[in-house]
Amino acid sequence: MECIFCRIVKGQAPARIVYEDETVMAFEDLHPQAPVHLLVIPRRHLPSLSEATAEDEPLLGRLLAVAARLAQERQLAGRGYRTVINNGAGAGQSVFHLHVHLLGGRLFHWPPG
Ligand code: DGP
């Protein structure tokens, strides 16, 4: 079974897409953990942060820049928002296609669970 996020990128699985360009895409998380919960992903399949190489550094910056822009557009910055990358099953990663969670619209606690 192909990666679910690759299927979303190809338009083969449904998603509420909020942003896309030639390298990244953002859509609403299926199981939101906050009033705003978006996932920002590379179009290209990259399983996790730990598998990113030096060549991926511009892409990693792009993922965060898009997350920040989406947060700005949704006026999340004033109250604060959180970006999360779960890396590996032990850290809670369940979809092995790199993604940045953008969460906002509520208060967040530290340390995370
Ligand atoms: P993580 O646990 O960090 O790998 O986060 C994966 C997220 O992906 C999780 O919050 C739920 C979300 N998710 C899983 N499958 C789908 C899907 O088919 N569509 C969308 N929009 N989100 C999904």
Image (cartoon, helix red, strand yellow):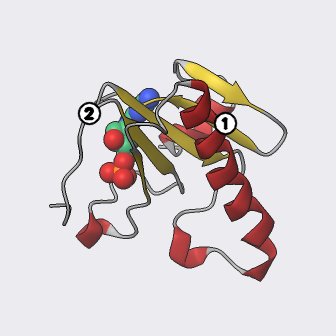
Q: Where does the image place residue 24, in percent across and percent down from the top left? A: 72, 43
- Residue furthest toward the bottom? 54
Left or right: residue 80 compared with residue 44: left
Q: Is residue 18 above or below residue 9?
A: above
For ligand 1, the image quadrant comes to: top left
Question: Residue 33, located in which quarter of the rendered image?
Answer: top left
> Element at badge 1?
strand
Tell me if the residue at label 2 has its CB under 8 Å from ligand 1. Answer: no
Question: Residue 98, located in which quarter of the rendered image?
Answer: bottom right
Q: Is residue 71 above or below residue 13?
A: below
Q: Label 2: which residue? A: 106
In primary-sequence order, the first of circles 2 and 1 is 1
Neighbourhood count class around disc 1 (C-alpha, 10 Å): few under 14, some 14–19, many 20 upward: many
Front-most of residues 56 and 107: 107
Front-most of residues 74 and 86: 74
Q: Label 1: which residue? A: 25
Q: Is residue 48 above or below residue 77?
A: below
Q: Where does the image place residue 4, in percent across and percent down from the top left? A: 49, 39
Q: Where does the image place residue 57, in percent across and percent down from the top left? A: 74, 72
Neighbourhood count class around disc 2 (C-alpha, 10 Å): few under 14, some 14–19, many 20 upward: some
Label 2, label 1: how far apart the Cα atoms are = 24 Å
